[in-house]
Amino acid sequence: MIIHAGYYEGDLYLWGEVSEDDNDINKQTKGGIRPHPLGASIGGLSRSLKGTSLKIRPRVSSSLVKIWLPTINNNPIPSSDAGLAPPEANLTVVPWSVQAIRLPLETTVDVICAVMGKKTLDSGAVVGADLVYWTDVLRFAGLHVARQQFLPDLTVDKNAYTAVWTPVFVDDSLERLSGLVERMPAVARALAPTEAGPPRRSAQEILSQAVNMMVDYIVRSAASGSHTPMTGRRKIFSSAHELWLYALKATGRVAGTQYGISDLVTDVHQWRWPIDIRTRHPIQLCFRLEEPDEEAGYTDEWRVRYLVQYRDDPSLTISAEEVWRDGTNLFPGQDDISIRELLLILLGQAARVSSSIAASLARREMGGYNIDMKGAYEFLTKDAVALRKAGHTVMLPTWWTNKSIKPRLAARAGTKNFNISTGMLSLNTIVSFDWEAALGGQKMTLDELERIARIKEPLVRVRGKWTAVDVPDIESAIKFMKKGPKKVRFRDVIRTALGVTDIPSGMVFDGVETDDHMAEVLKRLDGKAGFRELEQPEGFVGTLRPYQLRGYSW
């Protein structure tokens, strides 16, 4: 059996798909709609879920629902999980009836957690691709909670007020959301239990509702410890705000017209407005760190530049200073808020997490600000991280994003200056040995490392390129290279090549470079070189097994 999961109006429905010779096929119809010929019965579905420790009550939550599936020759095509290739003929989408178990939200989360990371259940049932998809959705919702990217809200639906927690989609979460929309299996939104025609809601609408409900459930559970409905003795609140805060921990609608709830809705929406306008507007703010322009004579003047990007095409950037001067012409048609007002809101939000940005705004610098090397390092290590956590886009130099601050050490060994009279290389052969360091992908001499250590700056130019360094690690590398022996036995080279070395923990070992005399031996040691398999030696009493013969040959 394959366990499928479809989402409809806030609930997840589980249904099963079996083989033609299975005895657990559902034969019930719904409103004249034919039963799915491979649809599992409730009994079969329930048995497949046994042993999963899931608290599901099929008799209470089961129902016959309508699902729209691609059909050919009056038969729905099997799902891809069945291992059958889809037919190439033209398909039509036709309604079928299946027996399903409707899961309330709290049970939905339990079920998804129970199947997360599994391909099959203990009963042998296969976890369908659509059910796997909902595990990714739950992870996405949980990520927002872990990042604290959510806000309280107060919604209105037909004069009914509800206190909810809603996710805030910013920066990379928008990309993740878009990716989940594109990956949603069609069968995951094929249910239409109460609709006459096919499902009308888009994948975007369904996913947004599902993520919103999951985030609200997770936050509410953590806030209250459990879902406690607002029932029993009526509580007395001193204000609408107190009622709202209470409702954010309990389930149920916000009730009590005497508190002026409608005014609170306005207050909450005004409070959320700076974030809401930012998430729905087609532009976003970007902060780019630029290196000193040495050609212009600025050797220690870095710049953090403020840019405006289009969300749909981040490659299109415009200076925030230019937007401030001529934003109306650059972004026509944005009537809900002036572009200058939006720019001030975005910069103001960034200023809350970066004192340097706050200082630049106080100086009325709308295009960015200049800093020295220490300021650049502080931006790289602190401000950039804080801005990204706050949902802003940050563009950093590639040498930082692909950084390898730790020095890399490689050993060089050779027999060039040593007389090997027998023409044989033994473990006791004396060979030359030296350590070489690399920084930022470039080999460094000992003199260059010492010069960098004397500068004692976290950012240095190495042969025309900026590199991030950790000065204590550089000093450790210098000390290690100076104390290393210049002559060693070949057995020591082998030990080093196999990683048995005492290099300091702040460095990365890049292996051993050798000449032709030793390279072949080292290649055989690490399995990179092949060898000819020999015959069993004459006079040996017994028979070598294949692995023993390979070991002997090696």
Image (cartoon, grey):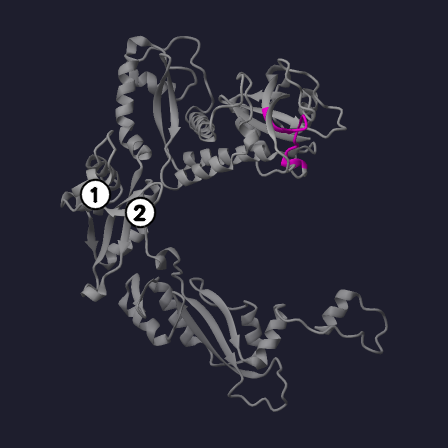
Secondary element at tag 2? loop
**Neighbours of disc 1 within 10 Å: few (<14), some (14-19), many (20+):** many
The reply, left or right, for residue 233 in relation to residue 495 is: left
Between 166 and 431, the one nearer to me in the picture: 166
* Position of 243 relative to 111 (above/below): above
Spatial separation of the CA atoms under disc 2 and disc 1: 13 Å
Residue placed under numbered mark 2 in the picture: 316
Give the quadrant of the C terminus: bottom right
Between 208 and 301, the one nearer to me in the picture: 208
Give the quadrant of the N terminus: top right
Between 381 and 131, the one nearer to me in the picture: 131
Q: Is residue 71 magenta?
A: yes
Q: Which mark is residue 176?
A: none
**Neighbours of disc 2 within 10 Å: few (<14), some (14-19), many (20+):** few
Residue at 29 percent across and 24 percent down: it is: 269
Q: How many marks?
A: 2
Which quarter of the figure has residue 498? bottom right
Residue at the farthest front position: 90
Which residue type does callout 1 highlight?
Val
* Position of 172 relative to 48 (above/below): below
Which quarter of the figure has residue 549? bottom right
Q: Give whichever of discs 2 and 1 has the lower sequence position.
A: 2
Residue at 28 percent across and 51 percent down: it is: 288
Residue 544 in sight from this viewpoint = yes
Residue at the farthest left position: 363
Q: Which mark is residue 323?
A: 1
Q: Which residues are magenta?
A: 68-82
Between 518 and 303, the one nearer to me in the picture: 303
Image position, residue 477 (x, y; %): 40, 69
